[in-house]
Image (cartoon, rainbow, N blue to C red):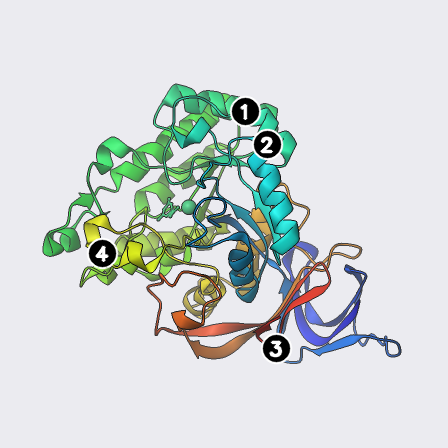
């Protein structure tokens, strides 16, 4: 179990590393990071990383693995394999499973199953309310004790403000972050896409941006009055970015994430009733995309998460109104970040990594996201300049619901190493 990664361009924002270096890994841990290391002799895998980037394994703080309950869409095995080829070595999965992750037994189940069949580190997120019903708080202490890294009713908002306030107070006591899905369902009504020119043109019922922004504002206020940190999930509108920017300036303990589809796509992609572009929150407009990019650049948006949301073809191959919300995300996220943010000069590679490994690790309290000596060797080797065409039929995910099929992107994952174990070698999943 010895690996030597030679001559790669190592970028590790946490430790201020940005240089051509070698990395030596033994027994799953990083032992040495220096120039010109020589560990020849004995059994060792030498990886030639010349002209490649060697970076900390990516961390996705928002994904859906669908197990237990919806294994026909994805399961822990297929989901973690999909994550590994996307360059992720740690992922946090949302509780909208069946049963819901609202008790110790389900948390245990996911942890045990992930150890057994998962190829990356899996961290469950528990529910805020029992059964995600928004009526009664889940046992937050029990969930934390069982090992959740945060709580969320993702997919649904906690509409009752008093309940949300109490959730923040409890979560703060147990030192666990609350991840808020912000969507006022009374404003969504029967909407299925962003409200605007495209919804009118397509004759589909629109969702006002206010549905997201009202709840972002409420949750920021509740964070401020309770003193409890809050993390806003999948930010998609210009107004939401503005509210969060303003709150941060006031010192509110708010962090937030966006997803690749909110800085790469607009509601124009829905044209033709493309259900692979149906997602919640919905794809917005050019103005929103520009605001998301600005928020990423000025640091208002801390994290890029995938919101990997696999759905079966039969749930997408239906009328737009009836189609499920969601996009598979693991296998395109890094390349979308490189192609649309780094190559366009919006973020440096260091900043992209800050948002795809360092910040999510810090928000969830994981001791991950950097290439530290004596730390588990979670490392990816990527070619930032290699172009490829997205083909959903090659995805490791069980589901293929991606609007990026046929897109030319830049950035490929050549090696994924998790705890010193090679999971992807020369772009091939083992
Ligand atoms: O599009 C979405 N899909 N948004 C969510 O909030 C939930 C997710 C899912 O679980 O499919
Ligand atoms: Zn989600």
Q: Quarter of the image for the N terminus: give it.
A: bottom right
Q: Earlier in the sequence, mark 1 or mark 3?
A: 1
| Lateral position of residue 99 relative to residue 313, left or right | right
Q: Which residue is mark 2?
A: 104
| Lateral position of residue 233 relative to residue 227, left or right | left
Secondary structure state at the residue bearing disc 4: loop
Toward which corner of the image does residue 246 lie, by quadrant? top left
Q: Which residue is mark 3?
A: 426
Q: From the Cβ of disc 4, is ligand 1 less than 8 Å away?
A: no
Q: Position of residue 146 (x, y in %)?
A: 63, 33
Q: Which residue is mark 1?
A: 139
Please tell me which residue is depicted at 77% across the width and 60% down the height of the picture: 28
Q: Earlier in the sequence, mark 1 or mark 4?
A: 1
Judge the density around disc 4: few (<14), some (14-19), many (≥20) Cα neighbours within 10 Å. Answer: few
For the question of whether residue 351 can be seen, the reply is no
Give the Cα distance between marks 4 and 3.
Answer: 38 Å
Q: Nearer the viewer, residue 393 or 71?
A: 71
- Which disc is residue 318 wearing? 4
Please tell me which residue is depicted at 61% across the width and 50% down the height of the picture: 114
Q: Position of residue 179 (x, y in %)?
A: 47, 37
Q: Position of residue 165 (x, y in %)?
A: 45, 22
**Marks 1 and 4: which is nearer the front?**
4
Q: Earlier in the sequence, mark 2 or mark 1?
A: 2
Q: Nearer the viewer, residue 169 or 391?
A: 391
Give the Cα distance between marks 1 and 3.
Answer: 44 Å
Please tell me which residue is depicted at 58% across the width and 34% down the height of the picture: 105
Give the Cα distance between marks 1 and 4.
Answer: 38 Å
Q: Position of residue 395 (x, y in %)?
A: 45, 68
Judge the density around disc 3: few (<14), some (14-19), many (≥20) Cα neighbours within 10 Å. Answer: few
Give the Cα distance between marks 3 and 2.
Answer: 39 Å
Determine whether label 4 and label 3 are within 8 Å by CB: no
């Amino acid at each position: 179990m010895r690996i030597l990664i030679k001559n790669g361009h190592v970028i590790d924002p946490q430790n201020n590393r940005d240089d051509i270096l070698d990395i030596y890994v033994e027994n799953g841990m990083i032992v040495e990071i220096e120039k010109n290391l020589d560990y020849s002799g004995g059994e060792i895998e030498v990886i030639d990383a010349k002209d490649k980037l060697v970076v900390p394994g990516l961390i996705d703080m928002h994904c859906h693995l669908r197990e237990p309950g919806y294994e026909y869409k994805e399961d822990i095995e297929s989901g973690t394999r999909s994550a590994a080829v996307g360059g992720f070595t740690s992922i946090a999965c949302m509780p909208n499973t069946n049963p819901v992750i609202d008790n110790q037994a389900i948390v245990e189940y996911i942890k045990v199953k992930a150890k057994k069949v998962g190829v990356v580190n899996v961290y469950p997120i528990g529910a805020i309310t029992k059964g995600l019903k928004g009526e009664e708080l889940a046992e937050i202490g029990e969930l934390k004790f069982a090992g959740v890294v945060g709580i969320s009713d993702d997919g649904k908002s906690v509409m009752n403000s008093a309940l949300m306030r109490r959730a923040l107070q409890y979560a703060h006591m147990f030192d666990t972050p609350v991840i808020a899905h912000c969507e006022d369902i009374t404003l969504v009504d029967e909407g299925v896409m962003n409200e605007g020119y495209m919804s009118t043109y397509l004759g589909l019922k629109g969702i006002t941006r206010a549905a997201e922004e009202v709840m972002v504002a409420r949750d920021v206020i509740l964070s401020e009055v309770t003193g409890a940190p809050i993390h806003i999930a999948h930010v998609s509108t210009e107004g939401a970015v503005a509210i969060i920017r303003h709150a941060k300036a006031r010192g509110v303990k708010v962090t937030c994430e966006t997803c690749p589809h909110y800085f790469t796509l607009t509601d124009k992609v829905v044209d033709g009733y493309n259900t692979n572009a149906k997602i919640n929150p919905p794809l917005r407009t050019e103005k929103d995309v520009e605001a998301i990019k600005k928020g990423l650049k000025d640091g208002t948006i801390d994290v890029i998460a995938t919101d990997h949301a696999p759905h079966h073809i039969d749930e997408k191959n239906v009328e737009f109104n009836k189609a499920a919300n969601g996009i598979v995300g693991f296998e395109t996220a890094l390349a979308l970040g490189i192609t649309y943010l780094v190559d366009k000069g919006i973020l440096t590679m260091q900043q992209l990594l800050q948002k795809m490994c360092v910040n999510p690790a810090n928000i969830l309290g994981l001791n991950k996201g950097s290439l530290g000596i004596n730390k588990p060797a979670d490392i990816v080797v990527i070619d930032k300049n290699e172009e490829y065409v997205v083909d959903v039929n090659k995805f490791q995910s069980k589901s293929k619901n991606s609007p990026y099929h046929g897109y030319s992107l830049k950035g490929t994952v050549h090696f994924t190493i998790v705890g010193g174990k090679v999971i992807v070698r020369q772009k091939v999943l083992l």
